[in-house]
Each structure stands twice: as C-alpha cells, then as structure tokens.
Amino acid sequence: MADKPVRADKAAAVAELAEQFRSAQATVLTEYRGLTVGQLKQLRRSLAGQASYTVAKNTLAKRAAADAGITGLEDLFTGPTALAFVSGDVVEAAKGLREFAKANPLLVIKGGVFEGKAISADEVTRLADLEPREVLLAKLAGAMKANLSRAAALFQAPLSKAARAAAALQDKREKEGQVA
C-alpha cells in the first residue's frame, strides 16, 4: 500500500520529530490517557533539563521514528502517545518518569529507544534503577585508586625487604666487629 501524500505542516512535524529522535540520547514513549493539563505541566517541569516531553500523533511519530532509522517501536504507537526526548542524563530522566508514574498511575511507560535500539518498559525501569552517572564514576575511580595503591605496595615490597636485609646485615657486622 502506497503512503498517502503528506501535507506540508505534517511533513514539517515529522521532520522535527525525526530530528528529535536522532539528537536525543534516549527516547521514552508513554501513554498519558487521563492525565490533566496541569499534571502534564508538572511532568514537563520535573523533566526540565533532562528531557523534553512532547505529545505527538501516532502516525506522525511512527513515520518520524522510521525516518530516523529506528525500528521496533511500531507496536508501541497505540493510544495517546507522548515522547520524552532525553537530552541530559538518561538515568535521571528515567527516574523522573518512573517517580511521576508512581505518583500518577495514569502515566504508563510503554518502552523507548536507547543507543539507537528499541527497549521495553522493563528496560526503562532498569535504567531508572541505576545509580547516577557521578556515583558510578566515583565508584570506578575509587576502585582504580585502590588497585593502584595495591600495585604500588607490591612494587615497593621487594625494595623495603632488601633495605631491611641490608640494615640487618650491617647490624650483624657491627656486632661481630665489636665482639672480634
């Protein structure tokens, strides 16, 4: 079946959505049926700095995802769909969406895109369960420092052992010299 011709305004909307899909670090698809305008504003404010939250028509969003080279989302474009395009920390944005969904059960996380691949709602939740990037980097730095300290002690051990042996030998000779 051939694609229907797209009006200019719809083509522009598809192009804009496709660019957002391409430039976002991740995208989370949600269903917002039953949420009030005030709740959507609150969600947008809570995601500020991490993600932009956009309500989109399924046909346009589906076409934009295809234009951006993203596959595997086709089944998620059912019901009222909104897209959280993550530009900041993916983990923090996923946590923000999860926390908002806990407080507002009408927000349903359907799935998303991470590193160019479609992910399920469970995988979005697993992202939200990760520790923030700064904490992970601090743990990595601590582990590396501990390993370097152990390596330095290991390399230093033969030198200090040799120094102790030389000192003991010198003490022995001094004692023998006094006795002799």
Image: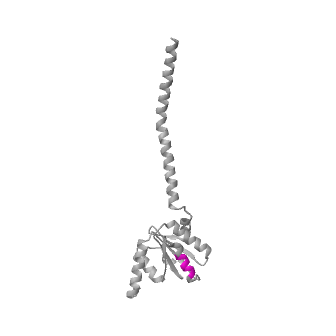
**What percent of the width, then of the height, locates residue 69?**
41, 73
**What percent of the width, then of the height, locates residue 48?**
50, 73
Q: Residue at x 49, y 67 (%)?
A: 90
> How many numbered dots are placed on residues in this image?
0
Q: Residue at x 46, y 83 (%)?
A: 59
Farthest top residue in view = 180
Span shown in magenta: 38-44
Q: How is the image coloured?
A: one colour
Q: Residue at x 55, y 66 (%)?
A: 128
Looking at the image, which is closer to me, 20 or 179?
179
Does the segment drawn in magenta span residue 101? no
**What percent of the width, then of the height, locates residue 65?**
43, 76
User: Does residue 3 appear in this view?
Assistant: no
Query: For residue 16, which quarter of the picture?
Result: bottom left
**What percent of the width, then of the height, locates residue 150?**
50, 42
Looking at the image, which is closer to me, 160 or 80?
160
Q: Residue at x 53, y 82 (%)?
A: 80
- Position of residue 20 relative to residue 131, above or below, is below
- Quadrant holding the N terminus: bottom left
Looking at the image, which is closer to me, 93 or 4?
93
Does the magenta stretch mainly form a helix, a strand or a loop? helix
User: Does residue 26 appear in this view?
Assistant: yes
- Position of residue 159 relative to residue 4, above or below, is above
